[in-house]
Amino acid sequence: MANYWLMKSEPGEFSIDDLRARRSRTEPWDGVRNYQARNMMRDEMRPGDQAFFYHSACEEPGIVGIVKIASEAYPDPTAFDPQDKHYDPKSDPDDPRWFLVDVKFVRKLGRTIGLRELRGHDALADMVLLRRGNRLSVMPVSAEHWNYILGLE
DNA sequence: GCCAACGTTGGC
DNA sequence: GCCAACGTTGGC
């Protein structure tokens, strides 16, 4: 059964519009350096799963679009590149520490569903995103929450 | 294994 | 820019 996710990106680094502008509309979700987030990408995501694209650390944090998981997990090449800002010398190409999946643009939402708005809905109170101190950049979303949020659009 | 110091995330 | 929350590191 397909699962649902939420993936954060700083729009100043990589936005939903950047993804849409790619010729393939597909991009490797690189640079994740958190073990929980890695484990979800590596062990639980499947091609065809859908995810909310979330803009963080910006003027209006919130859900801006939908993407589809477009590959199995594979080693994050940026971890091996000393020139890359996400370089991790402890990730051995023969025993990679960091993984990623490709994501493909599906659509932008008609409007941004802001973090503040999400917090206002009791039905969403136990979303991982809304938990105190949550810092995960990749997290699961229940089917109930997924459908509820789409209903807000 | 404990825990203080440090770095990062991300909302505000 | 501030700062709360949390993960990681490393000395012991």
Image (cartoon, coloured by chain):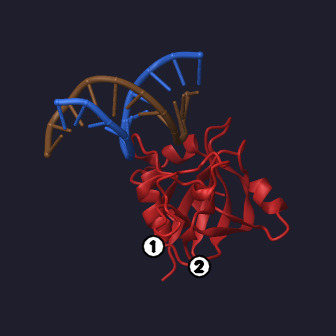
Chain colours: A red, B brown, C blue
Q: Which residue is mark 2?
A: A47
- Is disc 1 placed on a helix, strand or loop? helix
In the image, residue A141 lies at what x, y percent? 48, 63
Cα distance in 3D space between marks 1 and 2: 10 Å
Q: Name the one closer to the observer, A50 or A75.
A: A75
Q: Which residue is mark 1?
A: A44
Q: Name the one closer to the observer, A100 or B10.
A: A100
Subunit ID for the residue under disc 2: A
Q: Residue at x 76, y 60 (%)?
A: A19
In the image, residue A93 sits, relative to residue A36, either above or below, namely below
In the image, residue A152 sits, relative to residue A40, either above or below, namely above
Q: Amino acid at mark 2?
A: Pro
Q: Residue at x 39, y 41 (%)?
A: A132
Crowd rating for badge 1 (residues with CA inside 10 Å; few <14, some 14–19, many 20+): few
In the image, residue A7 lies at what x, y percent? 57, 57
Q: Are marks 1 and 2 on the same chain?
A: yes
Q: Is residue A44 left or right of residue A106?
A: left
Q: Residue at x 59, y 65 (%)?
A: A51
In the image, residue A82 lies at what x, y percent? 63, 50
Whether residue A120 can be seen here: no
Q: Quadrant of the C terminus of chain A?
A: bottom right
Q: Residue at x 59, y 49 (%)?
A: A86
Whether residue A23 can be seen here: yes
Q: Is residue A87 left or right of residue A105?
A: left
Rendering quarter of residue A134: top left
- Is disc 2 placed on a helix, strand or loop? loop
Subunit ID for the residue under disc 1: A
Rendering quarter of residue A12: top right
Crowd rating for badge 2 (residues with CA inside 10 Å; few <14, some 14–19, many 20+): some
Label number found at residue A118: none
Q: Amino acid at mark 1?
A: Glu
